[in-house]
Image: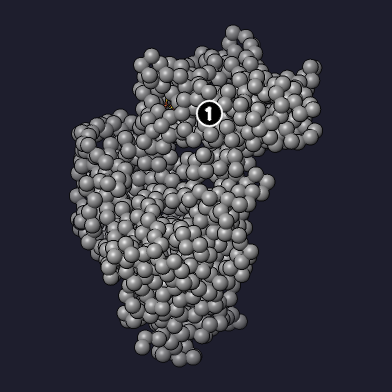
C-alpha cells in the first residue's frame, strides 16, 4: 500500500481542478471500492480528493417530471426514496439487491457507477491483467470466468479477447434500461452523456471503463419521466441468496394492453463490460403477444451473439441458458402483474 | 469390562450461557492481535508468486530505506532453525519454493501500513520449475500413504467385494466430488510475539489465536530448540478455527523469527484474508468412487469406497475420507482405499470433520441412489443396513442410536407424507423436494491433558469458590462454560462457585480442540482432579488446597466402537427457470451421548449443519492450475452461506448416556453436525428436480438444461 495525500477541497470546482491537474489524483466518494483497491495495490494514486460535502446528496424533481439524483446520494437513501419506489421500482430493487446494508449506507451514486470490475485477476496484482496494466495480457480469459462476460467482448484479428470483465453494478442496470443520463462537470465545462454510452466495451483498451476524462466529476444522474418504469422489476441471480455479485441480472419494464406488449425496457447485468441494454430483445417484445414464446424469442435475439468462455477452470457457457431463464421468468411475472 | 463410573449429573445437562459472553459482546474480551503491548512492530510478509522453483534474488534496499522499516527478513539471512523435520515450519530456511504463497521474506515496521508498503517494495526473482497444482484422479503420481489422518489404515479389505458386486442384483456405481474448501474462521490467524534473551537462551511470550496452547508451545520449542518451559502461549479467546488453528502453521514460526530479530520488542502479525488461503491449511478436494451391491430388498452385500485426494509435496496430509464408510452400514464384503496426488500446493490440513465430512457426502448420496434403484424409502434402506456391531472391527458399539435418530426425524419432519417421485412438486415456480442422510463421527479420546482444582475458603461474608485450570481452548464453542459444569458436578458444588481458566500455558497442559475430543479429554482430566481433591481433602478443605488430575488410561477403545450418530432431513427448492437452489428447512437429530449444555450444544450442532449447508451450496476454492493459487481468495468471492441462505434449522437429540467414552457420559459434538448435511441437500435436490448432482457445491449450472 503506497502512501498518499488526502485532500478536502472547499468546492466541487476545486476538486475538479485538483484531479484535472494531477494524473496521479483520484476522487474519493464512499470509499467502499477505492479503499479496497488501495490496500490491494490495484490503485496507487498519490492524492485522494475527498468529495464529501461537495456533491449533491439530494434527489430532486426535474421540470419534465423526471428525477435528478445527486452523485453523493447514498445507495440506501436512493433505494428508500418514495418517488423512486413509486415511479422506478426496478431501480429500488436493484439497489437493495446490491452489497450489504452497511455498504449501501456508505456507497454513493457516482461511486457505484464508477466501481471497477470484480474480476479476481484484476484484483490480484500478481496475475496479468490488461485492464490494470495495458498490454500485460488477460489472466481471466483462460481462467476462472464464472463472473465474466458473454456479450460484447469481441475478439481482435488474432482471435484474442483483450478483456472479458463485467461491470458489477446492480444500480446501473435499471438505470440504463430507463435511459438515464449522466451529468458531468469537468475542467472544460459541463456535459451530459447517456448512461448507455457512458461505460465502454473493452475493445483493445480495457484500461478505460468509461468515457470519463481525467478530472471530470459525475455530478448527477438524471432519470427521464418514463411511465412504463412504474411497472419495472429487477431480478438478480447469484451464487448465494444475498451479498454476492450477479451471475446474471435482468432489469425490465413492460406495458401490456389486451395481451400485447406495447412497451418494453430490458437491460442485463453480469454479462458484459457495461450494463447491457438489450435493444434486440426490446424490439422482439414491442408489439408481440405477452407469451412464453415471445419471451424466449426475445432472449434468443439478444443472446444470438453471445460468446461464452470455455476454460479449464470453469467456463461461463451456463450463463446463456441462465440468462434466457432469468429473462423469461422476469417477463412472465411482470406481464402477469396487473397495475 | 471398562464401564466408567459416571459423574452424577446436576449442572451437566442444564442450559447455561457462555460465561465469557458479556466480555465478548461488550468488546472487552481480548483476541490475539488486540493485546496492548509497548512499542509493537508490525510484520507484513512477501509470498512466493511461483508454485515451484527457487528464489534467485531478493532486493530489499528500497524497503529498508523506507522510514519506519526496522528489518527485512529473507531466505538469505534468516537464522537457521533447530528442527525443520516438519517442512511446513521450515520458514525462510532456503530458497526452494514448494507452493505459491510460501513465505520468502517479511518486513518489520513501526506501523502496519509501513510494513505493507515496505513489502510492496521488496522485489523477488525466481527460477521456475514445472509444477502441478490441480488434483488429477488419473495422475501417474498417485500413491498410497502409510496411513491416513490421524493414524488410520490407508486401505481396508474385508471379504471378496469384487464377487459380491458382480453377483449383486442391484448396484450403484458412481463418482462423487467435493471441492477444495478453506476453514475461514472469522478471526484471522494472528500472533503477538516477544522474545526476551537471557544468557545463551531466552523466552518467548506468544499471544496467539490457537486451538491448543500446549501444542503451540511444544512446536515452537522444537523448531527453535528451546525448553518448552521457555515458551509461554496465551490464547483465552479464539474467534473460530474449524481445525485451521489446531495444527500450528508457518505464520507462528515467521512471527517468532521476526521477534528474535528485535529482542524485547513485540511483533504483531495478523494474516490478511488472502494470506489465509495459502498458509493455514484447507480441506483437500476429493474424487470418490463408490460402488454398492445389494439384494433387491436393499440389503448391502458389497461396498467399495475408493478415494483420490491431494497432498502437498512438501508435507503429507492424508484426509481419512473413506473411514466414514468403515463404520456406518453393514455389508459382508467391503473395501476402502485412499490415494494421494502429490501437488505443488499449500499444505492441506484439518477442517471440521476431516474425513467424515467429504466421505459422508459420497457415501450418503450413494445410499440415496441405492434407495432409488431398489424402490425403497431412503430411511428404510438405512434401517435395513444397520449393523449389530462395528462392520469392520466387529466390536460392539459403546452406544449407537442411528435408527432412533432416523425414526425421530421421520416423525418430526413429517417424512411419512413424502411422495418419493422426483420432479413432481412445482410450487410457485420452484421444484421442491426432501432428502435424508445419516451422520457418524468417532468419539475420540486422547491422553495428555492435566487439570488443577483449587479451593478458596469464603472471605468474610463472601462465598467459597473454586479455580479450575486447564490449558484447554475455547474457540467459541462454550468449552470453558461446560468445563465449569463438569467440575461442579465432580466436586458436588454449585456451578456458580467455579471459575475456569483455559487457553494459557501457565496452567496444566492439555490436548488441542480437535476431533470433537476436547470436552472428553479435558472433562476427564477435570473430573480426575476433582476426585483426587476430594480424596485428599474430603468435604471440608482449607483455603488454598489444590489437587492435580490427568486423563487416566482407558482401554474402552479396545473393547468398543465409539461414535456419535445423527440424521439430517432437508427440504430443497430449485427454481424451474434459473436453477437457483434454496434450503428452507433443515432438521438434525443426533445421538451424541449426554448433552452437557443444551445451549452451547445447540449452537455447535446448528453451526455444523450451517457449515454443511455452506459446503453443499457455496464453498469452493477455485484453484487456477496455471498459476497454482486459489483465485477467489477473499470473502467476496469465496462464498460462505449468508443469513439469507439459512432457513429454518431444527436441532434435536436423543436421550443417550454413553458409559464408556468418558466419566460425563458424553461424546463430542463439534463436528457431527456437518457430517452428512451436504448429502441430505443433494438428495433433496434430486427429489425436487430429478437431477442427480454428484459434486458440491451445487450451483445453478447443475440444473440448467
Ligand atoms: C463486499 C462488497 C460487496 C458488494 N456487492 C455489490 C453488489 O452486489 N452489487 C453492486 O452493485 N455493488 C456491490 N458492491 C460495490 C459497491 O456498490 C461499490 O463499492 C460502491 O457503489 C462504490 O461507491 P463509493 O461511493 O464507495 O465509491 P468509491 O469507492 O469512493 O469510488 C469508486 C470509484 O468511483 C470514483 N468516483 C466516485 N465518485 C465519483 C464522482 N462523483 N465522479 C467521478 N468519479 C467518482 C472514484 O474515484 C473511484 O474510482 C460491493 C462492494 C463490496 C465491498
Ligand atoms: S478480464 Fe479484464 S479485468 Fe479481468 S484479467 Fe482480463 S483484462 Fe483484467
Name the chain under label 1.
A
- Could you say which is closer to the camera, residue A283 or residue B282? A283
Residue drawn at (32%, 36%) of the image: B627
Is any atom of residue B408 visible in this view? yes
Position of A157 with respect to A29 (left or right) is left
Q: Which secondary structure lies at badge 1?
A: loop
* Residue B316 in picture, x, y percent from top left: 26, 54
Q: Nearer the viewer, residue A300 or B495?
A: A300
Residue of label 1: A271
Q: Picture coordinates of residue B464 (x, y %)?
A: 54, 81
Residue, x 62% and y 14% (percent of image)? A193
Residue B636 seen in the figure: no
Q: Is residue A193 above or below residue B174?
A: above
The total of numbered circles placed on residues is 1
The yes-or-no answer for disc 1 within 8 Å of ligand 2 is no
Q: Is the residue marked by circle 1 packed among few (<14), some (14-19), or many (20+) residues within 10 Å?
A: many
From the viewer's side, name the closer residue of A73 and B120. Answer: A73
Q: Position of residue B343 (x, y in %)?
A: 27, 46
Relative to B674, say whether A173 is above or below.
above
In the figure, residue B450 lies in which quadrant?
Answer: bottom left
Q: Residue at x 41, y 62 (%)?
A: B170
Look at 46% across and 69% down and name the residue there.
B297
Residue B682 place in picture, x, y as percent: 50, 54
- Colour scheme of this structure image? one colour
**Quadrant location, the N terminus of chain B:** bottom left
- From the viewer's perspective, tell me whether residue A247 is left or right of residue B307: right
Amino acid at each position: 500500500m503506497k502512501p498518499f495525500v488526502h485532500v478536502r477541497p472547499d468546492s466541487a470546482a476545486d476538486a475538479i481542478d485538483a484531479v484535472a491537474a494531477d494524473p496521479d489524483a483520484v476522487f474519493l466518494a464512499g470509499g467502499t471500492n477505492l479503499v479496497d483497491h488501495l490496500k490491494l495495490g490495484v490503485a496507487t494514486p498519490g492524492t485522494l480528493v475527498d468529495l464529501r460535502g461537495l456533491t449533491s446528496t439530494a434527489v430532486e424533481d426535474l421540470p419534465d417530471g423526471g428525477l435528478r439524483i445527486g452523485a453523493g446520494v447514498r445507495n440506501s437513501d436512493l433505494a428508500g426514496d418514495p418517488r423512486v419506489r413509486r415511479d422506478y421500482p426496478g431501480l429500488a430493487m436493484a439497489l437493495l439487491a446490491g452489497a450489504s446494508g452497511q455498504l449501501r449506507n456508505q456507497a454513493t451514486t457516482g461511486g457505484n457507477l464508477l466501481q471497477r470490475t470484480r474480476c479476481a485477476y484484476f484484483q490480484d496484482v500478481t496475475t496479468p491483467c490488461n485492464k490494470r496494466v495495458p498490454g500485460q495480457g488477460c489472466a481471466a480469459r483462460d481462467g476462472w470466468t464464472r463472473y465474466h462476460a458473454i456479450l460484447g467482448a469481441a475478439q481482435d484479428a488474432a482471435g484474442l479477447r483483450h478483456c472479458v470483465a463485467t461491470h458489477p453494478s446492480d444500480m446501473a442496470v435499471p438505470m440504463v434500461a430507463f435511459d438515464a443520463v449522466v451529468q458531468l462537470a469537468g475542467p472544460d465545462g459541463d456535459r451530459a452523456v447517456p448512461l448507455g454510452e457512458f461505460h465502454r466495451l473493452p475493445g483493445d483498451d480495457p484500461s478505460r471503463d468509461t468515457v470519463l476524462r481525467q478530472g471530470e466529476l459525475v455530478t448527477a444522474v438524471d432519470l427521464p419521466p418514463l411511465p412504463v418504469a412504474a411497472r419495472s422489476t429487477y431480478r438478480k441471480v447469484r451464487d448465494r441468496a444475498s451479498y454476492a455479485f450477479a451471475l446474471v441480472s435482468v432489469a425490465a419494464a413492460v406495458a401490456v394492453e389486451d395481451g400485447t406488449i406495447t412497451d418494453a425496457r430490458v437491460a442485463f447485468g453480469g454479462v458484459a463490460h457495461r450494463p447491457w441494454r438489450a435493444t434486440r430483445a426490446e424490439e422482439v417484445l414491442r408489439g408481440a403477444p405477452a407469451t412464453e414464446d415471445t419471451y424466449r424469442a426475445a432472449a434468443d435475439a439478444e443472446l444470438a451473439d453471445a460468446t461464452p468462455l470455455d476454460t479449464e477452470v470453469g467456463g461461463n457457457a451456463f450463463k446463456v441458458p441462465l440468462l434466457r431463464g432469468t429473462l423469461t421468468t422476469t417477463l412472465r411475472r411482470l406481464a402477469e402483474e396487473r397495475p | 469390562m471398562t464401564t466408567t463410573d459416571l459423574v452424577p449429573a446436576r449442572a451437566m445437562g442444564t442450559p447455561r450461557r457462555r460465561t465469557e459472553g458479556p466480555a465478548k459482546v461488550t468488546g472487552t474480551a481480548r483476541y490475539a492481535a488486540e493485546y496492548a503491548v509497548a512499542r509493537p512492530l508490525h510484520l507484513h510478509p512477501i509470498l512466493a508468486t511461483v508454485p515451484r522453483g527457487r528464489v534467485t534474488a531478493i532486493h530489499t534496499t528500497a524497503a529498508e530505506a523506507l522510514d519506519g522499516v526496522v528489518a527485512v527478513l529473507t531466505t538469505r539471512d534468516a537464522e537457521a532453525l533447530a528442527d525443520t523435520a516438519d517442512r511446513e515450519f521450515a520458514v525462510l530456511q532456503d530458497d526452494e519454493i514448494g507452493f505459491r504463497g510460501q513465505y520468502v521474506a517479511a518486513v518489520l515496521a513501526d506501523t502496519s501500513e509501513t510494513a505493507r508498503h515496505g513489502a510492496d517494495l521488496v522485489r523477488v526473482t525466481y527460477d521456475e520449475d514445472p509444477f502441478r497444482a490441480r488434483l488429477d484422479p488419473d495422475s501417474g503420481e498417485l500413491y498410497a500413504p502409510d496411513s491416513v489422518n490421524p493414524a488410520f489404515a490407508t486401505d481396508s479389505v474385508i471379504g471378496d467385494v469384487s464377487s459380491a458386486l458382480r453377483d449383486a442384483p442391484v448396484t450403484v456405481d458412481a463418482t462423487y466430488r467435493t471441492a477444495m474448501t478453506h476453514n475461514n474462521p472469522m478471526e484471522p490467524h494472528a500472533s503477538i510475539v516477544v522474545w526476551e534473551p537471557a544468557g545463551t537462551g531466552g523466552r518467548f511470550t506468544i499471544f496467539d489465536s490457537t486451538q491448543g496452547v500446549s501444542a503451540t508451545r511444544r512446536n515452537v520449542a522444537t523448531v527453535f530448540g528451546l525448553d518448552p518451559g521457555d515458551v509461554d502461549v496465551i490464547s483465552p479467546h479464539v474467534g473460530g478455527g474449524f481445525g485451521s488453528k489446531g495444527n500450528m502453521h508457518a505464520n507462528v514460526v515467521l512471527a517468532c523469527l521476526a521477534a528474535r530479530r528485535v529482542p524485547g520488542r513485540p511483533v504483531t502479525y495478523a494474516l490478511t484474508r488472502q494470506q489465509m488461503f495459502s498458509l493455514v491449511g484447507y480441506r483437500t478436494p476429493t474424487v470418490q468412487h463408490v460402488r454398492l451391491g445389494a439384494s433387491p430388498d436393499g440389503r448391502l452385500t458389497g461396498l467399495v469406497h475408493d478415494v483420490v485426494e491431494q497432498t502437498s509435496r512438501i508435507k503429507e496430509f492424508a484426509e481419512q475420507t473413506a473411514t466414514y464408510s468403515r463404520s456406518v452400514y453393514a455389508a459382508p464384503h467391503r473395501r476402502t482405499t485412499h490415494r494421494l496426488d502429490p501437488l505443488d500446493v499449500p499444505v492441506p490440513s484439518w477442517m471440521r470433520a476431516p474425513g467424515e465430512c467429504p466421505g459422508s457426502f459420497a457415501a450418503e448420496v450413494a445410499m440415496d441412489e441405492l434407495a432409488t434403484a431398489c424402490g425403497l424409502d431412503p430411511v428404510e434402506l438405512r434401517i435395513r443396513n444397520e449393523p449389530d456391531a462395528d462392520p469392520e472391527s466387529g466390536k460392539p458399539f459403546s452406544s449407537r442410536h442411528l435408527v432412533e435418530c432416523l425414526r425421530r426425524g421421520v416423525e418430526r419432519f413429517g417424512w411419512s407424507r413424502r411422495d418419493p417421485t422426483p420432479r413432481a412438486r412445482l410450487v410457485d415456480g420452484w421444484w421442491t423436494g426432501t432428502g435424508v442422510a445419516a451422520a457418524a463421527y468417532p468419539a475420540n479420546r486422547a491422553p495428555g491433558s492435566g487439570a488443577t482444582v483449587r479451593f478458596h475458603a469464603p472471605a468474610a461474608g463472601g462465598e467459597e469458590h473454586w479455580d479450575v485450570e486447564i490449558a484447554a481452548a475455547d474457540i467459541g464453542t462454550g468449552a470453558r462454560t461446560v468445563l465449569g459444569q463438569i467440575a461442579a458436578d465432580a466436586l458436588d458444588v454449585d456451578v456458580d462457585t467455579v471459575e475456569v481458566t483455559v487457553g494459557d500455558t501457565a496452567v496444566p497442559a492439555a490436548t488441542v480442540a480437535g476431533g470433537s475430543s476436547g470436552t472428553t479429554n479435558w472433562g476427564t482430566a477435570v473430573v480426575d482432579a476433582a476426585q483426587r481433591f476430594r480424596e485428599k481433602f474430603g468435604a471440608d478443605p482449607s483455603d488454598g488446597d489444590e489437587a492435580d488430575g490427568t486423563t487416566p488410561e482407558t482401554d474402552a477403545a479396545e473393547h468398543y466402537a465409539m461414535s456419535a450418530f445423527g440424521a439430517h432431513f432437508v427440504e430443497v427448492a430449485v427454481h424451474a427457470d434459473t436453477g437457483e437452489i434454496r434450503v428452507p428447512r433443515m432438521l438434525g437429530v443426533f445421538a451424541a451421548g449426554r448433552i452437557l449444555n443444551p445451549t452451547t450444544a445447540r449452537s455447535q450442532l446448528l453451526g455444523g449443519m450451517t457449515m454443511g449447508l455452506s459446503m453443499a451450496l457455496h464453498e469452493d476454492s477455485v484453484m487456477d492450475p496455471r498459476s497454482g493459487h486459489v483465485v477467489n481468495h477473499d470473502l467476496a468471492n469465496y462464498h460462505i452461506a449468508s443469513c439469507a441462505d439459512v432457513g429454518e434449522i431444527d436441532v434435536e437429540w436423543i436421550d443417550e448416556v454413553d458409559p464408556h467414552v468418558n466419566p460425563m457420559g458424553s461424546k463430542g459434538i463439534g463436528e457431527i453436525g456437518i457430517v452428512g448435511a451436504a448429502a441430505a441437500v443433494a438428495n433433496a435436490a434430486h427429489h425436487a428436480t430429478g437431477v442427480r448432482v454428484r459434486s458440491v457445491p451445487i450451483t445453478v449450472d447443475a440444473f440448467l438444461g
